Amino acid sequence: MGDQSGSRNGPQQKYVSGAQNAWDMFSDELSQKHITTGSGDLNDILGGGIHCKEVTEIGGVPGVGKTQLGIQLAINVQIPVECGGLGGKAVYIDTEGSFMVERVYQIAEGCIRDILEHFPHSHEKSSSVQKQLQPERFLADIYYFRICSYTEQIAVINYMEKFLREHKDVRIVIIDSVTFHFRQDFEDLALRTRVLSGLSLKLMKIAKTYNLAVVLLNQVTTKFTEGSFQLTLALGQFCVIQV
């Protein structure tokens, strides 16, 4: 009986000790900083920007600028704390090969110009800020993973928790795009849905556990309902915010 009681209380104690009251949750949400998108209108739509501890899916037709926004977020998350940013690093998981380092450099230069315009003396007050406001430093703080198959994508996402434990300053994980290889290589639609569901749940856990934002860039998909169709995002039921 003693052994049974001990084995029963172990998991119970684990869950009870991890409990959180509603006020703590509300206070935690209010204290969370956001990652600016670089657009005031889009920030307003998102409630201040991209939220940490949440998964945001951003979708659109090809050529609308999803990768551009993803790169912008990878740069903006590095804005120094002294300038209103998070001062974090980024993970960029590229499944389509659309990540262009020359464009990243240009966006970093633009971000630095904006910082100096709004905080003209910030680099003079802090040596750490002065070191950070270099395009090369911004690029060095983006961890890039090139993915060439859905099996590689699954492996990288499964590896991500270990990576984040070793790189605690990462504040955003961007996947561009999350369903590309699954659309190309997966013929079993039911299995594809289950695998994507599992990956989405894992990413939600990562966002909350490591206090970071997860952004999934995606193409819209066609959903047929009652003789008609509409454009929709593929992972809507698993994402807190959709754009």
Image: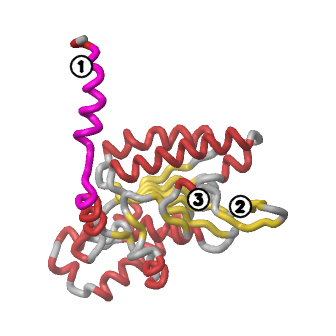
* Residue that label 2 marks: 221
Please tell me in which quadrant of the rendered image residue 40 appears.
bottom left
Q: Amino acid at mark 3?
A: Gly
Give the foreground label among 2 and 3. 3
Q: For marks 2 and 3, give the CA distance.
A: 11 Å
Q: Amino acid at mark 2?
A: Thr
Q: Secondary structure at mark 2?
A: strand
Q: Which of 32 and 157 lies nearest the eye of the viewer?
A: 32
Say if the magenta span includes residue 10.
yes
Q: Earlier in the sequence, mark 1 or mark 3?
A: 1
Q: Answer above or below: position of 35 versus 171.
A: below
Q: Which of 3 and 102 lies nearest the eye of the viewer?
A: 3
* Residue that label 1 marks: 6
Residue stretch in magenta: 4-24
Q: Are marks 1 and 3 in contact (CB under 8 Å)?
A: no
Q: Which of 160 and 137 lies nearest the eye of the viewer?
A: 160
* Residue that label 3 marks: 236
